[in-house]
């Protein structure tokens, strides 16, 4: 099996930062209009920094894996740093080589998280 598929499957089976958060400072949500799946991210923010992040939702393996990988990447970072994360960055993190029809699944979490920056 391809390496990137292993990475995705591992994060899907064992998603990092998965679950709801009590008393979050910010909650953002994004729906994939193509399938109706949704991701919800919860944040604790202190002095412009993401102290904690969690996510829930109903999504395919790729969107869950992408959420998990992205949540790890942004934890502890500044909110401003999110503005610099591109779709290409997420593709690299997830292992790249995703079928075009599934790119929306990969980018769904990034679209949600970008709402934190007002973009
Ligand atoms: Fe719905 Fe991937 S099929 S997010």
Image (cartoon, rainbow, N blue to C red):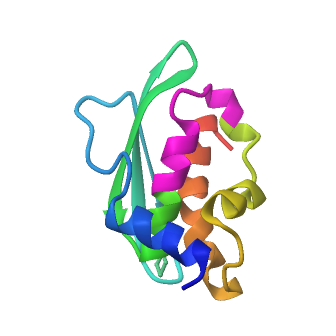
Going by the image, does 115 lie left or right of 14? right
As for residue 34 lying within the magenta part, the answer is: no
Q: Residue at x 26, y 45 (%)?
A: 20
Q: Position of residue 33 (x, y in %)?
A: 52, 77
- Of 93 and 38, the residue lying toward us: 93
Q: In the image as oriented, which residue stretches furthest toward the left?
A: 22
- Of 112 and 64, the residue lying toward us: 64
Camera sees residue 32: no
- 56 above or below 78? below
Q: Residue at x 42, y 60 (%)?
A: 39
Q: Position of residue 78 (x, y in %)?
A: 62, 25
Q: How many marks?
A: 0
Magenta range: 68-81
Q: Residue at x 70, y 70 (%)?
A: 96
Q: Residue at x 53, y 27 (%)?
A: 76
- 28 above or below 103? above
**Quadrant of the drawing holding the N terminus:** bottom right
């Amino acid at each position: 099996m391809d390496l990137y598929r292993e990475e995705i499957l591992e994060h899907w089976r064992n998603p990092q930062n998965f679950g709801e958060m009590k008393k979050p400072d910010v909650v953002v949500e994004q729906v994939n209009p193509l399938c109706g799946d949704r991701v919800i991210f919860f944040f604790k923010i202190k002095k412009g920094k993401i102290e904690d992040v969690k996510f829930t939702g109903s999504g395919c393996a790729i969107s869950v894996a992408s959420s998990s990988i992205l949540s790890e990447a942004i934890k502890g970072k500044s909110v401003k740093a999110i503005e610099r994360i591109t779709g290409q960055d997420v593709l690299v993190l997830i292992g790249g080589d995703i079928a075009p029809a599934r790119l929306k699944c990969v980018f769904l979490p990034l679209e949600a998280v970008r709402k934190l920056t007002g973009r």
